[in-house]
Image (cartoon, rainbow, N blue to C red):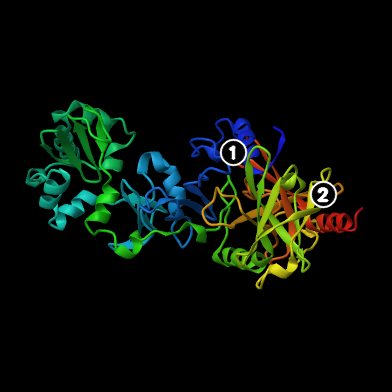
């Protein structure tokens, strides 16, 4: 598949959709988003050692819950192994301690890390409800039947106990079919514990799940449908999860990891990425352009104190109006001081006396000095990640020789990042983000290309000299 430039967003986004087909990178984007429309923020995205989900935050796409490996508990790996969102629902809490074990809630269950097995186990949520005297409240408010009298299990063998409880499923063939459709229902749902007909819905309660067959149409089910109760959400509602763990964290605070294969990074590396972004942020600008038929958003880099900004040529090609916004909030009209379409470099100029304080030129160094495998960070104004500019962590892969040289990495850049920064972990600008290519490789579905910053600076200086 061909190389694709990443901005202006309003034009390239359609090309991205056309090139992607069913690729996972934008599956959650239901429809094209023009720059002049309200941008669509990705509801979930990879982070170092795991993934970040906003869908169960209750606060939109700017808050959510991470699920990660590390700290002695590999929750993300287990979440994926057990079927992920489709089987467990979205992560719905941060980690907390429950009955002495590290635990994390998803919408449908509580995952409890078991060091002795190196895996998670499902908490018997509904048994805990019974132990805490919550059955009556569950029946009244959530139509969950109480646990039946289990004294008949006394003296039975384990196979006999299973048979006695599984017989409860015979009361509803649809729920029975749903239960046994799971490859390991006893392990996943526990044994059935009780049932009740509530008129509009028939419910069978198990140790770790509850199933409802509806006789009426609801906002989430039609008559005849079988639904699984979100046991993790109930655990939150009835106090099994501490309030501190149910408070979602800000999505803009997350470092976005590459798409595809999970990237491992310890807390020291993540902290270094955030420091590098903080060092470089005063040199980054947002660029808004008005084109003949649309608008666009991109990024740029302040390269000297005379109001000169480096960006990509394709960002400002055919632009009728250009506005630059600095870190201090100052927004100024910009003009094109020079453009080199062949090398995709442009320089803009603004009134330097109007910029204000807090803006500094970038520290630029040659990206060709990077070593394969070295960690890099990207900073840019794509609207597809919450919080702008968003910070991305990636791995430098190779230098593509040429004039200018091009740096290849797996950094997750998207439309709006054109002209933005590729950084080393000291905060030096090593590349100007320029192009992306999509592949059919699940390990790396997106390849990023950045113009070597030292070469880009030389081109910019030539353009400023009128050459």
User: Residue 404's x, y, as percent?
Assistant: 84, 50
Relative to 455, residue 157 above or below: above
Relative to 280, residue 143 above or below: above
Q: Is residue 409 left or right of residue 339?
A: left
- Residue under label 2: 339
> Is the residue marked by circle 1 packed among few (<14), some (14-19), or many (20+) residues within 10 Å?
few
Give the tally of numbered discs: 2
Between 394 and 35, the one lying in front of the other is: 35
| Cα distance in 3D space between marks 2 and 1 | 37 Å
Q: Is residue 455 left or right of residue 393?
A: right
Q: Is residue 429 left or right of residue 228?
A: right
- Kindly identify the residue that appears in the image at 25 percent across and 58 percent down: 240
Query: Furthest-bottom residue in view?
Result: 357
- Residue under label 1: 442
User: Residue 142's x, y, as percent?
Assistant: 17, 46
User: Residue 400's x, y, as percent?
Assistant: 80, 46
- Kindly identify the residue that appears in the image at 21 percent across and 56 percent down: 238
Q: Secondary structure at mark 2?
A: strand
Point out the image quarter for the N terminus: top right
Residue 94 figure quarter: bottom left
Q: Secondary structure at mark 1?
A: loop
> Which circle's residue, 2 or 1, is located before the other in the chain?
2
Q: Is residue 388 left or right of residue 424?
A: left
- Residue 377 in sight: no
Query: Furthest-right residue in view?
Result: 467
């Amino acid at each position: 598949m061909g190389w694709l430039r990443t901005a202006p967003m309003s034009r390239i986004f359609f090309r991205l959709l056309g090139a992607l087909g069913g690729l996972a990178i934008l599956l959650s984007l239901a429809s094209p988003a023009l720059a002049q429309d309200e941008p669509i923020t990705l509801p979930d995205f990879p982070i170092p050692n795991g993934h970040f989900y906003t869908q169960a935050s209750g606060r939109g796409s700017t808050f959510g819950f991470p699920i990660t490996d590390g700290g002695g508990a590999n929750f993300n790996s287990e979440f994926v192994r057990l079927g992920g969102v489709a089987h467990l629902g979205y992560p719905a809490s941060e980690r907390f301690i429950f009955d002495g074990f590290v635990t994390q809630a998803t919408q449908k269950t509580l995952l409890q890390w078991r060091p002795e097995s190196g895996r998670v186990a499902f908490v018997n949520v509904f048994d805990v409800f019974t132990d805490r005297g919550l059955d009556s409240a569950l029946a009244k408010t959530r139509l969950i039947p109480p646990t039946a009298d289990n004294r008949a299990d006394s003296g039975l063998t384990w196979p006999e106990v299973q048979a006695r409880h599984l017989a409860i499923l015979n009361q509803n063939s649809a729920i029975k079919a749903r239960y046994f459709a799971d490859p390991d229902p006893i392990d996943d749902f526990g044994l059935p514990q009780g049932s009740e007909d509530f008129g509009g819905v028939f419910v069978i309660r198990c140790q770790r799940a509850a199933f409802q067959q509806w006789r009426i149409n609801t906002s989430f089910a039609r008559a005849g449908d079988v639904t699984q109760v979100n046991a993790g959400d109930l655990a939150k509602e009835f106090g099994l999860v501490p309030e501190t763990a149910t408070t979602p964290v800000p999505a803009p605070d997350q470092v976005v990891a590459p798409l595809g294969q999970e990237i491992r990074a310890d807390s020291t590396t993540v902290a270094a990425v955030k420091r590098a972004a903080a060092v470089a942020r005063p040199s980054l600008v947002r660029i808004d352009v008005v084109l003949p038929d649309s608008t666009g958003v991109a990024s740029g880099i302040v390269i000297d104190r005379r109001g000169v900004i480096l960006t990509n040529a394709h960002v400002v090609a055919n632009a009728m109006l250009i506005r630059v916004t600095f870190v201090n909030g100052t927004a100024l009209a910009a003009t094109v001081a020079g453009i080199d379409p062949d090398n995709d470099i442009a320089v803009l100029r603004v009134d330097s006396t109007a910029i204000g304080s807090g803006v500094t030129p970038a520290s630029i160094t040659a990206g060709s000095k990077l070593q394969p495998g070295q960690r890099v960070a990207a900073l840019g104004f794509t609207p597809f990640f919450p919080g702008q500019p968003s910070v991305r962590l990636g791995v430098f892969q190779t230098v593509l020789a040429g004039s200018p040289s091009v740096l290849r990495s797996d950094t997750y850049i998207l439309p709006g990042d054109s002209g933005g920064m590729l950084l080393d972990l000291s905060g030096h600008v090593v590349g100007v983000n320029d192009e992306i290519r999509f592949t059919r490789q699940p390990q790396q579905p997106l390849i990023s290309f950045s113009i070597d910053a030292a070469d880009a600076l030389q081109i910019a200086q030539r353009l400023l000299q009128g050459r």
